[in-house]
Image: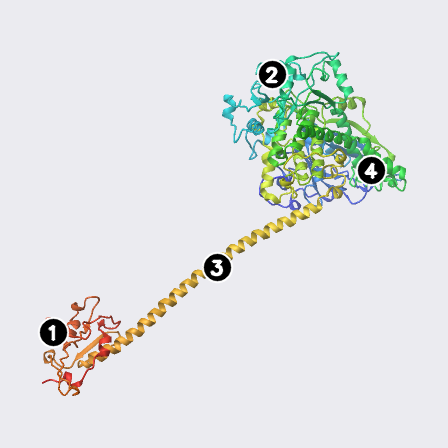
């Protein structure tokens, strides 16, 4: 599983906690199995260390702990904890969780105790005690062996805790119920199922709600298909969903009649439809044709015929019907003895019956067990701690003997796992090709219609519809075809159901090994299991657990390998998703049907796996390892139809090899490196965007400052020009006033002092006579009546309000009695002075010729 979320934010070092082992409790784990120095000291009783709490999930509690335990697979010593959720192994050296020795309790398939007797040394007075081992078989392809000190009760305590916790009597004793919904709650799965139906019918946007379900107002339809609520209360079929997609021409009464002709009332219903061509994928269970294969049902035949709608544009011609039986033909015939069987093409119009030859759940379980033994025997990190290159002088890998090497390679083929995967892939590709290329409708079934049928229908849908190859679509596909249509997850995973305990992990009998296994725990021949008592073997053969869902995900990984740009998700996502399903940490995959999950209140009581995975992806965005870096929707916008020659499956390295061959399982190192580079590029891109924003901000500031400087420069130039004009004014005014016989003085404070030398009354108007030229022989007298000047000392804006201004007006000799002015060019243009407020027409001053005789008195 993914890195677990800790219970608190504390960061206490495990090295500094109270669980540090004393010298008498340590195990020398650097040598071989024979070199282990087992002590005889009883374990010290102590409370659960505080540092261990940092590694626990929410509401996870320690039940039993064992100190000085040795993980044989990795040759490491540490502490083993049994919690209400998992086996937790903490390495003595690193003080961290060791993933190989940590496994969820629900992922444990079986476990047993082994006592390995070693030959005693003749010189030893005391007999060598047997090595006490605990062997754990996981559903995730690993075999773990823990070694315990002799003459202690640690192994017994751990073993008893596993018996209690891996085999709960009630469904509500599982960790998923104890942890609650936490923050991984989600919408009701019924709502999501209806939304997927609306998408298939082409009705959108149409978002369903719980109120619509309660009011039963979801029964909508298009031209060919409709959503029926005939199974709303699960009275017709307890393993089908509450809403079914059926032909529009078939009434609910006919649906009820047709259900009686199929095993467990799992009648033919639509799982996927192509709104453009009208072709559909339908699913059901086997028909109840009887031993003589002669039983018929008009309602069933009418329903199947209605699935084959007329081909558009072909004048009413009906499309072809392919009835696909997933079983071998002989198995289908054998089911006739129990009332089952298969259809006859004579009873179904224009139909073809095809048998795919896929084996049953028991064959799949045995095949995976043989594959697990093969990987453990020939892997790098085996359960006995010895590499396959060194075991028995290298003979297990050939050791120079080609026949021996051939035997080891043939063991992989003998497991049959890859053949089973290829059969499922080939059957799904054939179904998808019939729908995509021939526009045929395909009805798929096996015996009960919830194992092989689900594999084929969901995998064919994945090939046909690119929506299912996205995160959101993949969730909709799994919830529709696997959860809603009643794949018995509790039975297949060995979990308890509403009616009691399921097929839980069972205890193998105590096993003893002697001298021939001196260097390792018990090693069986390739492909074989440890010897068991007859009753235990019978228990394993009679249970209903099987890796059906694991096999389907294996098939998806094969398609992802063949078409790497067609899927939004990566192989790492599939592995993490499968780990979550096997661990039963969340409630989505508990129980056997939608009805049972509703009765148990799963959606309200347990966390949601989909929300957990979404939260993981949101933590890193598109750079998360769940995203497929090569995904390109434009390359695969339609169906993908792999040819038969391409359907050559291989071992799924990320899942099958991660424990036995951890280095070889990292086939995605290039992908990981690319992901790191993309992450760094994304960080640099963000840094670049931040830098560009800062540059733009600085540029805006520079532009603003430049504009302000230019404005200031303009103001400064205007002020300087104004100062020059005013200096010119001052010089002219001073000259004018001085010419009137006044003395102008400016103080340091800027005040103007006008000293009048003569009384204003002494001034009077005079006529200035200037001799003219006698060019015409006569003298002319010109009266300078228009040469009047008005000098005003102003305070603020009103020139008449200042006494100084009135004095200036009285000083002007060219003022008329009525206040008029005889200044050249008519009037004074009053221009302000920054010093005394004097205003005058200085151009007139410049043009005025003032003679000394002008100011002489009579």
Answer with mark 1 or mark 2, whichever residue precedes in sequence. 2
Dot label at residue 520: 4
> Which circle, 3 or 2, is nearer the viewer?
2
Q: CA distance from mark 4 to mark 2?
A: 62 Å
Q: Note whether 320 is above or below 72 in the view shown.
A: above
Answer with mark 4 or mark 1, whichever residue precedes in sequence. 4
- Determine whether the residue tagged by mark 4 lies in a helix, strand or loop: loop
Dot label at residue 597: none
Answer with mark 4 or mark 3, whichever residue precedes in sequence. 4
> Which circle, 4 or 1, is nearer the viewer?
1
Name the spot of residue 659 as percent of width and height, x first.
74, 39
Quadrant of the rendering where the N terminus is positioned: top right
Dot label at residue 255: 2
Q: CA distance from mark 3 to mark 2?
A: 73 Å
Q: Quadrant of residue 269?
A: top right
> Which circle, 4 or 2, is nearer the viewer?
2
Q: Which residue is mark 3?
A: 699
């Amino acid at each position: 599983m993914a890195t677990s979320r800790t219970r608190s934010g504390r960061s206490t070092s495990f090295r500094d906690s109270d669980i540090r082992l004393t010298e008498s409790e340590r195990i020398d784990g650097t040598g071989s199995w024979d070199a282990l120095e087992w002590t005889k000291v009883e374990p010290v009783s102590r409370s659960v260390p505080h540092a261990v709490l940092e590694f626990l999930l929410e509401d996870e509690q320690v039940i039993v702990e064992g100190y000085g335990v040795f993980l044989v697979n990795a040759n490491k010593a540490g502490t083993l904890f049994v919690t209400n959720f998992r086996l937790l192994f903490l390495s003595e050296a690193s003080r961290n969780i060791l993933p190989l020795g940590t496994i969820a309790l629900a992922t444990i398939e079986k476990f047993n105790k082994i006592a390995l007797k070693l030959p005693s040394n003749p010189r030893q007075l005391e007999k060598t005690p047997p090595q006490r081992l605990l062997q754990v078989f996981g559903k995730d392809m690993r075999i773990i062996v823990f070694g315990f000190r002799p003459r202690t009760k640690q192994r017994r305590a751990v073993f008893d805790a596993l018996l209690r916790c891996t085999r709960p009597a009630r469904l509500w004793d599982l960790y998923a119920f104890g942890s609650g919904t936490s923050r991984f709650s989600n919408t009701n799965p019924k709502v999501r199922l209806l939304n997927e139906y609306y998408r298939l019918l082409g009705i959108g946007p149409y978002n369903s709600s719980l109120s619509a379900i309660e009011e039963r107002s979801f029964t909508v339809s298009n031209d060919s298909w409709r959503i029926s609520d005939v199974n709303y209360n699960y009275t017709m079929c307890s393993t089908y969903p509450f809403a079914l997609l059926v032909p529009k021409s078939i009434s609910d009464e006919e649906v009820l009649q047709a259900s009686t002709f199929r095993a467990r009332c799992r009648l033919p219903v639509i799982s996927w439809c192509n709104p453009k061509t009208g072709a559909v994928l339908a699913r059901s269970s086997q028909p109840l044709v009887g031993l003589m294969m002669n039983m018929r049902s008009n309602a069933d035949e009418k329903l199947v015929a209605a699935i084959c709608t007329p081909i558009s544009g072909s004048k009413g011609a009906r499309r072809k019907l392919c009835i696909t039986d997933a079983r071998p033909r002989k198995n289908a015939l054998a089911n006739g003895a129990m009332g089952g069987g298969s259809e006859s093409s004579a009873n179904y119009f224009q139909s073809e019956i095809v048998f795919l030859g896929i084996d049953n759940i028991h064959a799949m379980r045995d095949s995976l067990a043989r594959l697990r033994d093969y990987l453990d025997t020939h892997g790098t990190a085996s359960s006995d701690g010895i590499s396959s290159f060194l075991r028995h002088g290298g003979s297990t890998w050939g050791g120079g003997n080609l026949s021996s090497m051939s035997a080891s390679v043939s063991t992989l083929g003998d497991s049959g796992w890859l053949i089973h995967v290829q059969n499922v892939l080939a059957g799904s590709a054939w179904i998808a090709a019939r729908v995509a290329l021939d526009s045929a409708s395909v009805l798929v079934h096996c015996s009960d219609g919830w194992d092989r049928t689900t594999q084929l229908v969901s995998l064919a849908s994945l090939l046909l519809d690119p929506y299912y190859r996205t995160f959101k679509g993949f969730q909709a596909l799994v919830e529709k075809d696997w959860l809603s249509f009643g794949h018995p997850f509790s039975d297949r995973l060995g979990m308890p159901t509403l009616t009691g305990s399921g097929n839980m992990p069972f205890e193998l009998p105590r096993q003893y090994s002697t001298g021939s296994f001196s260097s390792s725990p018990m090693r069986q021949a390739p492909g074989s299991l440890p010897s068991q008592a007859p009753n235990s073997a019978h228990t394993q053969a009679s249970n209903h657990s099987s890796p059906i869902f694991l096999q389907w995900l294996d098939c998806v990984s094969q398609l992802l390998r063949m078409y790497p740009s067609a899927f939004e998700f990566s192989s790492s996502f599939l592995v993490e998703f499968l780990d979550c399903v096997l661990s039963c940490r969340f409630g989505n995959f508990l129980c056997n049907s939608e009805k049972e999950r509703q009765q148990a209140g799963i959606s309200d009581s347990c966390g949601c796996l989909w929300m957990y995975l979404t939260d993981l992806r949101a933590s890193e965005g598109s750079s998360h390892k769940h995203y497929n870096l090569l995904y390109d929707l434009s390359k695969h916008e339609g169906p993908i139809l792999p040819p038969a020659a391409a359907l050559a499956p291989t071992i799924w390295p990320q899942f099958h090899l991660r424990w036995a061959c951890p280095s070889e399982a990292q086939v995605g190192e290039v992908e990981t490196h690319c992901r790191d580079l993309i992450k760094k590029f994304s960080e640099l891109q963000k840094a670049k965007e931040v830098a560009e924003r800062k540059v733009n901000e600085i540029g805006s500031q520079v532009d603003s400052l430049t504009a302000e400087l230019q404005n200031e420069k303009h103001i400064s130039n205007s002020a300087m020009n104004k100062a020059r004009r005013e200096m010119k004014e001052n010089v002219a005014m001073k000259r004018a006033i001085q010419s009137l016989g006044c003395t102008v003085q400016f103080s340091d404070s800027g005040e103007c002092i006008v000293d009048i030398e003569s009384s204003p009354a002494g001034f009077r108007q005079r006529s200035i006579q200037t001799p003219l030229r006698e060019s015409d022989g006569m003298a002319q007298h010109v009266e300078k009546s228009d040469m009047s000047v008005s000098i005003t000392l102003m305070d603020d804006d009103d020139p008449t309000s200042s006494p100084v201004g009135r004095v200036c007006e009285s000083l002007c000799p060219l003022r008329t009695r009525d206040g008029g002015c005889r200044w050249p060019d008519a009037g004074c243009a009053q221009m302000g002075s920054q010093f005394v407020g004097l205003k005058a027409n200085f151009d007139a001053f410049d043009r005025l010729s003032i003679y000394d005789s002008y100011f002489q008195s009579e």
